[in-house]
Amino acid sequence: MSVSESIIEELARAGNAAGLWRAGSAGEIDHAAACRALLSMDDPEMIFLAGRDWRDFDYTAGQERLAALESAEFLHKAGIFWRAFDFRAGLEALAEIGEPEYVYRAGRFWRGIDHRRALEIIIAMGEARYVYYAGQEWKVFDYDAGFEALMGMGSPEYIFYGGSYWRKFDHRRGFERLLETGSPEFIFKAGTLWSVFDYPRAWMVLESSGSGGALWRGRAFTQERWRGALREIWRESSRRALGRV
């Protein structure tokens, strides 16, 4: 048995994945044998590091092992740092693992990702947060599909954020959906930032929201855009009362 084989056998027997990675990084062992030994262990971090640092590594087997270990974190990192990576297979593995955060991160950092498919996966997971984040930060994003997803999911928080910060957003439809949620907080917040907003209708919802909307009604009296809108609502109400309309 060679010195290299002896080192690998001893480290493998001890389950010392970190030791294998260090030995492979030092370049003094048979990398093919070391890779087989490392992939037999359940240590996704060391597998990722070996793929990043070793001069010779079985990237296909390494990626398959990370997927089998269901390590979304290190599968995502491998897609960024490894010299060879199957982005299609990696994305489908993330879908199987079911962690939308890492699908979103892959959309930000993987150079070979299919953004259309990545968005489909996040939508299928029902995660409004990551639909919004993707629209805010991905270089390639289908705003029409993202918007329809937000409408379907009905999260007032991320409808508000989408209407506030996305480059493309149907504010009229978004407003209607936001009213349907009945959320005083995000109806108020949308009134502070959205370019298209029906203050009289929004105020009716805030007024009818009872004690749950008291805080946001109070803030409306002091927030500049809302304060101006409320003055106009009250003027219009007075004109109607006096029969001037």
Image (cartoon, rainbow, N blue to C red):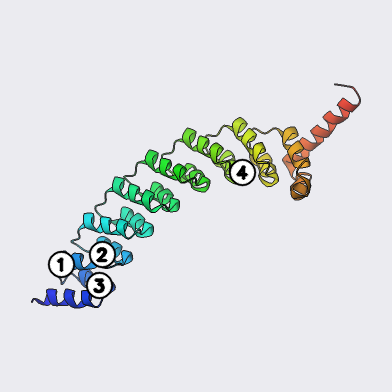
Asked if one can make out residue 195 in the rendered structure from this viewpoint, the answer is no
Name the residue: 15% across, 64% down: 32
The amino acid type of the residue labelled 3 equals Arg
Q: Which of 121 and 58 is in front in this view?
A: 121
Reading the chain from its start, which is encountered first: label 4 or label 1? 1
Q: Is residue 208 left or right of residue 40?
A: right
| Callout 3 touching callout 4 (CB < 8 Å) | no
Say which quarter of the image contains residue 80.
bottom left
Q: Nearer the viewer, mark 1 or mark 2?
A: 1
Which residue in the structure is indicated by mark 3? 22
Reading the chain from its start, which is encountered first: label 4 or label 2? 2
Mark 4 burial class by Cα count in 10 Å: few <14, some 14-19, many 20+: many
Reading the chain from its start, which is encountered first: label 3 or label 2? 3
Which residue in the structure is indicated by mark 2? 50
- Residue 240, placed above or below residue 64: above
Which residue in the structure is indicated by mark 1? 33
Q: Distance between the residues labelled 3 and 2?
A: 9 Å
* Mark seen at residue 156: 4
- Residue 176, placed above or below residue 16: above
Q: Could you tell me residue 193's position as x and y percent?
A: 64, 40
Q: Could you tell me residue 47's position as x and y percent?
A: 28, 64
Q: Distance between the residues labelled 4 and 2?
A: 44 Å
Q: Nearer the viewer, residue 51 or 100?
A: 100
Q: In which quarter of the image is the C terminus?
A: top right
